[in-house]
Amino acid sequence: MAGSNAIRGARVGSGPMGEMDHGVRAERTKVSYWDALGNETVRYFSADVPEEEIPEQIDSPSTGLPAGREKENPPLLAKNEPYKTHLAYVKERRTPEEAEELLEAALQKLRERRGTAKASA
């Protein structure tokens, strides 16, 4: 018989018909996180997880802001430092006087190579 309808109306992978319990639910801990806009995000952790392993902050899935466990004092968005150019880093390491000396030395080398250097007295 090619067209059997033995599983019509039954879920694939289900147990015997009429089975009410689909397993025992593990104990878990509910942790609420709040972002700066007041949005609450709930995360569940296994009851076996030690308190120190539960994160203090997460990223809020609705806003992308950091969310903390204190409703009255949510974490603020950390300000990112702007991109620094190579010149900005050099200016941090050198004083203007040192920069002038280095520039003059480099120009003197260039003039000597080209043969246009003035004779120093």
Image (tube, grey):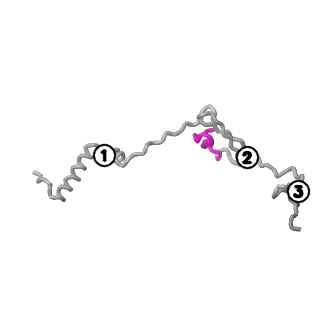
Residue at image position (61%, 38%) is 68
Residue 78 pos. (x, y %): 51, 40
Please state which of residues 117 and 91 is positioned toward the viewer in this rendering.
Answer: 117
* The label number, if any, that marks residue 94 in the structure image: 1
- Residue at the disc numbered 3: 16
Q: Residue furthest left?
A: 121
Which quadrant, please, contains the N terminus?
A: bottom right
| Marks 3 and 1 in Cβ contact (< 8 Å) | no
Give the residues drawn in magenta, as a range. Answer: 53-69
Residue 113 pos. (x, y %): 18, 59
- Residue at the disc numbered 2: 47
Please state which of residues 101 and 39 is positioned toward the viewer in this rendering.
Answer: 39
Mark 3 secondary-structure assignment: loop
Residue 39 pos. (x, y %): 64, 36
Position of 22 with respect to 119 (left or right) is: right
| Marks 2 and 3 in Cβ contact (< 8 Å) | no
Mark 2, Cα crowd under 10 Å, few <14 / some 14-19 / many 20+, is few
Closer to the chain start, of discs 1 and 2, is 2
